[in-house]
Image (cartoon, rainbow, N blue to C red):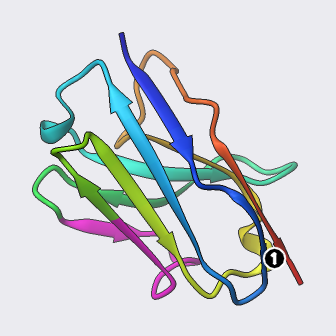
Amino acid sequence: QVYLAESGGGFVRQGGSRRLSCRAEGYVFQWTNMGWYRQAPGKDREMVATVASAGATNYGDSVKGRFTISRDNTKNTVYLQMNSLLPEDTAVYYCNKDPPFSSGYWGRGTQVTVSS
């Protein structure tokens, strides 16, 4: 059974950093492209960053140069290092496949709140 568990969120001041983790279970992680997504209040969920099974990365325009996605296939875990955080980065952050599971499954996410 698929299971995604995000962690690492919290409160941080503008300009600060945060590292998110997501552990995945229930499928062959090492062969799966993964992504981080976020949803701010009143807005649609958006792609933040993706990392292919072979390691190629892609970023949304708003986070380029500030966020770094990585993965550890030995731990079935994907990470998101967030630097130079801005108040507009405040959102619930989720990990999922890239593209997301067609079943509609999402984990609980982790809240990141950036104060100005």
Category of crowding for the residue at label 1, using alpha-carbon neighbours closer than 10 angstroms: few (below 14), some (14–19), many (at least 20): some
Quadrant for residue 32, please give it: top left
Out of 97 and 14, give the one closest to the viewer: 14
- From the viewer's perspective, is residue 15 above or below residue 34? below
Residue 19 percent coordinates (x, y): 52, 66
Out of 107 and 101, give the one closest to the viewer: 107
Residue at the image position 30 percent from the left and 63 percent from the top: 70
Q: Residue furthest top?
A: 1
Residue at the image position 29 percent from the left and 18 percent from the top: 26
Q: Quadrant of the N terminus?
A: top left
Q: Quadrant of the C terminus?
A: bottom right
Residue at the image position 87 percent from the left and 48 percent from the top: 42
Is residue 86 found left or right of 37 in the rendered image? Answer: right
Span colored in magenta = 56-69
Q: Disc 1 designates what residue?
A: 87
Q: How many marks?
A: 1
Quadrant for residue 103, please give it: top left
Q: The residue tagged with tag 1: helix, strand or loop?
A: helix
- From the viewer's perspective, is residue 55 above or below residue 81? above
Q: Amino acid at mark 1?
A: Pro
Residue at the image position 21 percent from the left and 54 percent from the top: 52
Residue 21 percent coordinates (x, y): 46, 52
- From the viewer's perspective, is residue 58 above or below residue 105? below
Any magenta on residue 66? yes
Residue 66 percent coordinates (x, y): 51, 84
- From the viewer's perspective, is residue 41 above or below residue 112? above
Any magenta on residue 106? no
